[in-house]
């Protein structure tokens, strides 16, 4: 078992530091450079601590940070420690009054930092703010959620999702809420999580057994269990290029995503729920494997079909057991 995050606490506070920004990066040097540029060229006159935790990048990430942004506190981990553990390393070094977990493939838009800071510090009952995430073309990304039900877990992000009753997915993704109005949510996507120090001190850090995916869902659930609210706040906008690190390892992405989902349901709904969802996920991958095999047999894009069959077979070989169990 890994570190469940509860014992992870921020460093002693420096009240003069408005925000500690924590960025966990892996092989996205140029995107990280743009992210840091957007932070340091931000019009808000804020006192920031910026922490980059490099998770064993093979590119020039560390030398880029040292050369162009020497004011950044850099942790060169030499190996891939995983997204939750990387954030926990940053949290333990954070001295700011607020702690902002930010993906390296993001860019701050305008005065987003200032408006999130002002809103969070004006409402002590809030523990976290999620910004409106935008694709580079300006379209809105779906980034606010209600907690998933067992039915959500069986269908969401699988090939069977189109077969799910619409109300299940719509409820989960909060499609009933206006994109221009702030609203209280259960959780927000991990690309942008602006948290109060009080919430982090009460809750601790991220559960490291997730490795990647569902860690933000778990963290938000624990923050809400400590009676802090979570606000989706469209007045703050962040450009998110989305998936730049995880796209580098597609088979591992499938494995981590689904094992993390199963960990969440095992942890909060019990073994019966994770077992039921596990069966549904295995059926999903068997179906995909057979479909790709049929397409390979008829000669349709055989190289692509072979690659996908290999990926799905590797996923099935893991048995898709809940991460950490």
Image (tube, rainbow, N blue to C red):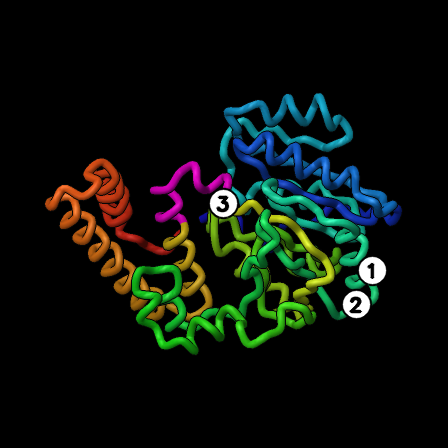
Q: Quadrant of residue 263?
A: bottom left
**Residue denoted by label 2:** 124
Percent of width and height locating residue 223 = 63, 64
- Of residues 225 and 255, which is closer to you in this image? 255
Percent of width and height locating residue 45 = 87, 45
Residues at marks 1 and 2 touching, judged by CB atoms closer than 8 Å:
no
Q: Which residues are magenta?
A: 244-256
> Taking 57 as reference, is 273 above or below it?
below
> Taking 25 as reference, is 220 above or below it?
below
**Which residue lies at the image location 25% right of the left edge and 39% below the top edge?**
304
**Which residue lies at the image location 64% right of the left edge and 47% below the top edge?**
102
- The answer to whether 260 appears left or right of 132 in the picture is left
- Of residues 75 and 242, which is closer to you in this image? 242
Residue 7 appears anywhere in the view: no
- Of residues 214 and 160, which is closer to you in this image? 160
Alpha carbon separation for disc pair 2 and 3? 32 Å
Percent of width and height locating residue 256 = 40, 48
**Residue denoted by label 1:** 118
Few, some or many residues within 10 Å of mark 2 (<14, 14–19, 20+): few
Alpha carbon separation for disc pair 1 and 2? 11 Å
**Which residue lies at the image location 58% right of the left edge and 41% below the top edge?**
86
Q: Which of the marked residues, 3 or 1, is nearer the chain's N terminus? A: 1
- The answer to whether 219 appears left or right of 256 in the picture is right
Assign a secondary structure to mark 2.
loop
Label of residue 243 in the image: 3
Predominant secondary structure in magenta? helix
Q: Is residue 219 magenta?
A: no
Percent of width and height locating residue 237 = 69, 55
Which dot, 2 or 3, sits closer to the camera? 3
Identify the image quadrant of the C terminus. bottom left
Which residue is at the far left?
A: 297
């Amino acid at each position: 078992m890994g570190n469940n995050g509860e014992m992870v606490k921020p460093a002693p506070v420096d009240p003069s530091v408005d925000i500690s920004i924590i960025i966990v990066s892996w092989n996205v040097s140029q995107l990280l450079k743009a992210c840091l540029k957007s932070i340091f060229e931000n019009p808000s006159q804020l006192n920031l601590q910026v922490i980059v935790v490099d998770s064993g990048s093979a590119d020039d990430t560390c030398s880029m940070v040292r050369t162009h942004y020497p004011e950044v506190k850099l942790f060169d981990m030499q190996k891939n420690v995983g997204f939750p553990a990387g954030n926990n390393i940053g949290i333990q070094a954070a001295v700011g009054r607020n702690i902002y977990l930010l993906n390296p493939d993001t860019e701050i838009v305008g005065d987003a930092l200032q408006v999130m800071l002002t809103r969070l510090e004006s409402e002590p009952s809030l523990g976290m703010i999620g910004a409106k995430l935008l694709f580079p073309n300006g379209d809105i990304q779906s980034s606010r959620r209600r907690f998933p039900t067992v039915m959500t877990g069986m269908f969401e992000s699988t090939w069977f999702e189109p077969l799910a009753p619409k109300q299940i997915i719509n409820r989960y993704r909060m499609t009933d809420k206006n994109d221009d109005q702030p609203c209280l949510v259960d959780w927000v996507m991990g690309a942008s999580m602006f948290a109060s120090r009080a919430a982090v001190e009460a809750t601790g850090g991220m559960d490291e057994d997730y490795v990647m995916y569902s860690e933000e869902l778990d963290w938000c659930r624990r923050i809400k269990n400590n009676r802090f609210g979570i606000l989706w706040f469209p007045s703050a906008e962040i450009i998110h290029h989305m998936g730049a690190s995880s796209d580098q390892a597609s088979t591992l992405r499938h494995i981590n995503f689904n094992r993390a989902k199963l960990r969440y349901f095992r942890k909060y709904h019990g073994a019966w729920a994770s077992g039921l969802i596990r069966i549904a996920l295995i059926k999903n991958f068997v179906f995909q494997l057979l479909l790709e095999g049929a397409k390979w047999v008829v000669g349709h894009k055989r190289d692509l079909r072979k690659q996908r069959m290999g990926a799905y077979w590797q996923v099935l070989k893991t048995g898709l057991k809940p991460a950490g169990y």
